[in-house]
Image (cartoon, helix red, strand yellow):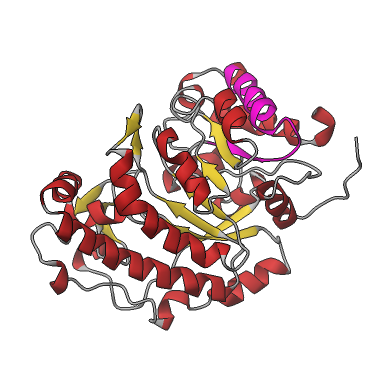
Amino acid sequence: MKTIRKQSKRERVSAVLKKKQVDRLPCQVSYTGRMGDRCAGYFNLEPADLPDFFNNHILRLDFSRPPGEETKEQQDQAVTRDLWGVGFDSSEEGYRVKDYPLRDKDMTRHTWPDPENPDFFKGIPELILEERTGRDRFVLPNLGFALFERAWSLTGLEDFLMMMYADPKQSEALLEKITEIQTAFCRKWVEAGVDGGYFGDDLGAQRGLLFSPDLWRKVFKPRYKRMFDVFTGAGLPVIMHSDGDIREILPDLVDIGLSSINPCQPEVLEHRWLKKEYGKDLAFFGGLSTQQVLPHGSSEDVIEEGKRCIRILGGDGTGLIYGPSHRIMSDIPLENVAAFIETCAFLKRDHG
């Protein structure tokens, strides 16, 4: 086995995304605030120390929020609004939309985020520069709710699905507005110095897409390509998170420049199939189920499933950023979090 010098976290992720050999496979754990507090207590840490404790290799950045945009609902802590004006239920660990700002309002009357507002990126270039001289993690922008989810989070899911069929002109006008804003934000992130693009958009259910692949190719694919092109045109990789069975459009995503797919949930995209069909084209990100083994398995189950995931998706010494498939939440026993940490020993090259 060829000896590889010790690499930085940023170097490992970059190499894995290019399918090059690494000194050890990188790992990444995301967690809810509630679960972060539980983990910190269990492992006797400060919450701020958890990323280092988990040996996280990626720093995912969100926009800074311009001052003066807090609503009364936010102050009452009932709803947390994002920069698009969507209100999320603050009591939930997940992302449950509570207020859809375009449900009863014309999109021309909505206050849209302005990518030219310098407050959105205030302090971000300095933070990236500090990261380069410190932990040197791989820096990604968090472009969650990128397009489809952004549209339905503004209008309501059923309303938007109906709109796509009953009023395609209106639905495409909304998607085009979102794409223009997101593409401008992508350019700003590249200018700020990120290492790649990270998009989130849940397009599937447990067994298939939420709409026909033909509709996706007509309406969504060209718009994703415009966003992806900002990063690929700068020589940067693109990672996408999409829940559900999206196998019908994986070739299309590869075609428009996708480098890595997340979450690699084994209940939905079987790992041996995924490696066989896309091991040459894609790196894999995630892999350890937060649907079954982490919340419901024993510690021994977690260790065996973690080893299996690493062996199948990363057994050739590259192509895997290992971790739980999704953010870990408070339904997961802390003993199983400890078992996950134990599986990370198998990311080293001497474990094959």
Question: Of all residues shown, which one is farthest toward the left?
Answer: 104
Pick the front one: 38 or 321: 321
Query: From this viewpoint, is residue 128 visible?
Result: yes
Left/right of residue 161 with respect to residue 263 in the rendered view: left
Asked if the stretch drawn in magenta spans residue 162, the answer is no
Please check the rendered image and state whether residue 303 is part of the magenta-colored stretch, yes or no: yes
- Is residue 64 visible in the rendered image? The answer is no
Q: Position of residue 232 (x, y in %)?
A: 57, 62
Q: Nearer the viewer, residue 266 or 42?
A: 266
Rendered position, 351 above or below 184 = above
The residue at the point 38 percent across, 71 percent down is 65
Q: Is residue 264 above or below residue 9?
A: above
Percent position of residue 247, x then y: 44, 34
Q: Quadrant of residue 135?
A: bottom right
For this view, does 171 lie left or right of residue 181? left
Q: How many numbered discs sit on the rendered protein?
A: 0
Q: Residue at x 75, y 33 (%)?
A: 316
Quadrant occupied by the N terminus: top right
In screen coordinates, is 348 left or right of 267? right
Picture coordinates of residue 139, whole percent (x, y): 60, 61
Q: Quadrant of residue 194?
A: bottom right
Q: Quadrant of the C terminus?
A: top right
Say which residue appears at 45% left-offset and 24% top-offset.
267
The magenta stretch spans which residues? Answer: 301-324
In the rendered image, residue 157, in percent from the top left (x then y), is placed at 20, 46
Residue beneath the point at 58% across and 51% down = 46
Q: Which of the pair 328/321 is nearer the observer?
A: 321
